[in-house]
Image (cartoon, rainbow, N blue to C red):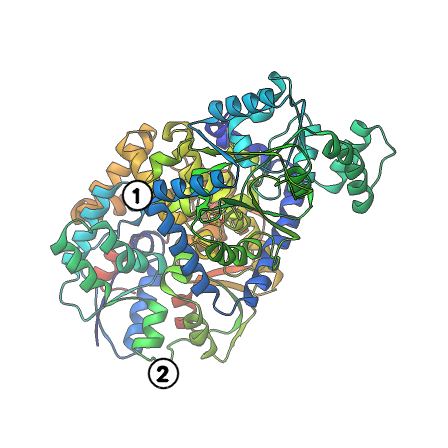
Amino acid sequence: MESRSRHFKANAAASLANPVLQTNLKTAKGKFVDKRAIAIKEIDDFEGSREAAKNIRNRVLENLDLWLEKFEESATARGATVLWAKDGEEICRHVAEIGQRHGVQKAAKSKSMLSEEANLNLALTAAGIRPIETDLGEYILQINDNEPPSHIIAPVVHKSLDEVADLFHQVHKTPRKTEIPALTREAREVLREHFLTADMGISGGNFLVAETGSVALVTNEGNGRMVTTLPRVHVVITGIEKVVPTLEDLTLLLRLLPRSATGQSISNYVSVLTGVKTPEERDGPEHLYFILVDNGRADVVGTEFQDMLRCIRCGACMNHCPVYQTIGGHAYGWVYPGPMGSVLTPLYTGLENAIDLPQAATLCNQCGVVCPVMIPLPELLRRLREKQVEKHLRPWFERFALKIWAKVAASPSLYALGSWLGVRYLKWLAGGRDRIAVLSAAPEWTLGRDFPAPEGKTFRELYRKGKK
Amino acid sequence: MRVALFVTCLVDLMRPRIGFAAIELLEAAGCDVIVPAGQTCCGQPVWNSGDRAAAAALAKKVIDEFVGSEYVVVPSGSCADQIRNEYPVILADEPEWRARAVELAGRVYELTDFLVNVAHIKTLPGNFSGSVTYHDSCTGLRGMGIKEQPRALLAKMSGVELKEMAAAEECCGFGGTFSVKFGEISAAIAAKKCGNACATGAQTIVGGDLGCLLNIEGKLRRLGDETTQVRHIAEVLTAKK
Ligand code: SF4
């Protein structure tokens, strides 16, 4: 997917000015945050579980190559083919080739963020394969002119029921329905035929299990099961970091993922899929492919950003992020929004292509405390800011202002002079009022709020004079 | 108890009365208070902006300035967090300095935490009366564990009625330099905080970090609210009727 992260500010302004989006974001926040808070109480030692989950993920990342080899070995032994993709282009090429090999005309897809990274649908269409998104959210986006998702687990969280009702009415040419069950029924009827006629199923993978060569899928709509069992060919596309050592490790992560994501104790469907259909079995694909994707991940291994690769894509960080809650996912401009996206986007698409994202956070650490695998997101954002400074990627006036502040704050006499002048200037600007309406030294501050006036003298002056 | 006050640059510039209120509180708790004269800024703005070298220089300056004081008290959760939790990280590569940072970390406290858990203050100098709602500033809350301490102090004041707001622990949108880099987003987040605070009907919004308070007050006034007061916890605890 082409990144629009460079335009973060403009994107965010558009989001702020969109009243429908604002209402939708508010509704979504309430649901996610409250439900998670209730669900995590079911686990006796939630913090201990987070710690254990973190350790499992770290253990894998420390020897990622070995665990991937182990996975490849186990998966191959069960009749699957493991392919490796360096980037989005290679994903597309692999899928197109698999399609050609098996005479595929239609591919039914369940959710895969990697296919968003790769812009796979476009490539499939070009290769003569018709991609059908079958996750309800992704389907809505697809029929809305391939709109990008705005959330990693709730891709249409930015849309209201009314908007979806209008869309179905226009695209399906059916009478407009406003009840959710009626709308989902309509989608089901459209999709059912595709499930039955698709020659290929494409899915993502929440986890890969090294000891068994399985892929674990966590879904709520059941479309994942159709996609992975009905078509002749099943292609799993997932990141190389998704591997976990054992089924037992998987069970712990499965306790944390749905609770953190949607506040469910368990998702409606949890599938652990292993190998191709054997002669005695009636269901399942005849051909199973894993496309394990790097697309920037390997470069993060062993760096100060490695913690980010623990991510299990639950979305809790964005659900709890004051910035995400205020501007929604599209503003971030690429596949992954919110705090995790603000770390991943610069890492995967280039620091210089997402210059605002590491800065677009208040570092409130709400994300860090909810993350089920304890990723120190604010700390990673801060390190990215450090990288930006090292590479001189920040605008000159910001660099200038920082240098001045560092100089002044390092010298008590300069500071005394500067602060003496500064507060008097601000006091003068306020002109006798208790606030300043336009602050030219920091114009962004007064865009949406006033700047309270200072008292007029510094603490150090007053303290020295012994006055209170 | 000998206490050195770290005033913070924001209090120095914007609200000296918070500094004096902090001194009054510490003295009421039986402390001898000194204010090292050369102090400026803890370096959080440069650290959070990614300037490690500048942050390290300021960290060393603070470490030097506060040598020998029994306790260092800060009327700000986020500046206290910078000193306690970030200095050892900033100076990780310089063992001697790191050791000194860790030593300082062991005796630096946020004001309300110090009053409640170290100085065990008995009587407060103020007799504020009115309804208040408390905003939990993010870094104080999640970095320093400041939650019950200010409430315990407010509970000692018979005239104070605490009305908790919804989502008190959610960010007000300040975020230091975030507020001047992404003004519109920052102000939009502040609007939500103001909404939650005002919904309680409290006359005064109280907090422990001046940055957040300036943000909230600025948003309230822009929204046309001329009546709701915004005060630092130290001001409330020392306010005389
Ligand atoms: S960073 Fe943590 S909270 Fe955010 S999506 Fe990943 S696992 Fe979930």
**Which residue is painted at 19% across and 55% down in the image?**
B62
Q: Does the residue labelled 1 lie within 8 Å of ligand 1?
A: no
Classed neighbour count for the residue bearing mark 2: other residues with Cα under 10 Å, few (<14), some (14–19), many (≥20): few
Going by the numbered disc 2, the residue's amino acid type is Lys
Q: Secondary structure beneath disc 1?
A: loop
Q: Does the residue labelled 2 lie within 8 Å of ligand 1?
A: no
Chain letter for mark 2: B
Q: Residue A290 appears at what percent x and percent y?
A: 51, 35
The quadrant where residue B150 appears:
bottom left
Q: How many labels does the image show?
A: 2
Q: Is residue A437 visible?
A: no
Q: Secondary structure beneath disc 2?
A: loop
**Which residue is painted at 58% across and 56% down in the image?**
A33
Chain letter for mark 1: A
Q: Residue B118 appears at what percent x and percent y?
A: 30, 76
Q: Mark 2 points at which residue?
A: B122
**Which of the pair A341/A273 is nearer the observer?**
A273
Between label 2 and label 1, give the one nearer the viewer. 1
The quadrant where residue A402 appears:
top left
Q: Mark 1 points at which residue?
A: A304
